[in-house]
Structure formats: structure tokens, C-alpha cells
Image (tube, rainbow, N blue to C red):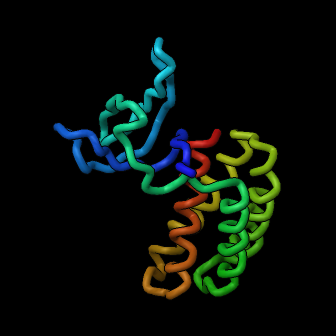
Amino acid sequence: MKDRIEKGDIVLINKTGKYHQQVGEVSEIDYNIFFVKIVIVKLGNQEETFEEKDLHLQTKKPSLQEVIASVDKILEKIDQITHLSTREQVELPNRLKYLKLDIPKLDKQLIQKNFDSIDKILAATREADSSASFWQEIDPNLEKIGWWIRTSL
């Protein structure tokens, strides 16, 4: 069964021409008057319109379960971060736990507020020690959560 292309997915453009073999993120889905699925793809800082048949699905956007699993993976790694202040040692796991509870509720403001705080704490910590091995686990999971937030809410 062919996976359906949805908002937030990463696609490869198969259509011959200017954008052939470029990869972009689906920013919107629409239908024309003939009920043909029209997909608006973000390519760098511009958006282009394609028919679904001209696109090949590269990566599905993360599901709710994958995002919650990513939060859990970050929670498992934060005790290895040594450059956290006492306040951040308490705040970071709490914010991650709240984020995990807020995600199923799809409350954009709460989710974005918690994610921004988590991202800010981790960004400051990364500057202090960017070579630690736990970043190899934290960074892709943080990116996955950010991707889901950007495309799902």
C-alpha cells in the first residue's frame, strides 16, 4: 500500500524540470476542481505546487507515539548532563514530563512554551559541553519533537 503524503512529510520531487530530485517538506495539501491532490512543498525559502503523483515520499512526519518516545529518550539522557545548574536539574526533567503530558492534548501554547524552555536550556548546556556522547541521542530526538510541533499544531 502506498503511503499517503500529508502535511509535514519530507518528499522527493520526481517531476522532470527545475525541481527534479530536490527534497522538500510538505507545507499544505489541497485539491483542484478535478479532485486531484495538490501538494505545496517548501523548498528552502520558497514554496512550489505539485500534484501528488509528481512526488515520492521520503520520510513520514513523526507520529504522536514517536514524539512521546523521543521525550522519554531525552528524559533517560538528562541525568548524564553535568553542566546544569541546580535549578535546571529540576526544571528540565519537569518540563519534559509536562511536555509529554501536553502533547496528546494538542495544546499549541503549552507545548510550544515547554519546548522552547527545554530547547533553551539544552542549547546553553550544549555550548558548555558539546562533545559529550549523550548529544547523539538528545539532538535527533529534540529535532523530531520540533518537527512534529512545527507540522502538527
Residue in view at x 43 percent, y 32 percent: 39
Q: Quadrant of residue 6?
A: top right
Asked if 61 appears above or below 75 in the picture, the reply is above
Q: Quadrant of residue 115?
A: bottom right
The outermost residue toward the top is 33
Q: Is residue 73 left or right of residue 139?
A: right
Residue in view at x 52 percent, y 69 percent: 140
Asked if 66 appears above or below 136 in the picture, the reply is above
Q: Is residue 142 left or right of residue 129?
A: right
Q: Is residue 92 left or right of residue 135?
A: right
The outermost residue toward the front is 1
Q: Quadrant of the C terminus?
A: top right
Residue in view at x 71 percent, y 54 percent: 64
Asked if 94 appears above or below 64 in the picture, the reply is below
Q: In the depicted view, which residue is nearer to us: 64 or 117? A: 64
What x and y, as percent, mark residue 81? Answer: 61, 83
Q: In the depicted view, which residue is nearer to us: 136 or 64? A: 64
Q: Quadrant of residue 58?
A: bottom left
Q: Is residue 71 left or right of residue 135?
A: right
Q: In the depicted view, which residue is nearer to us: 16 or 123? A: 16
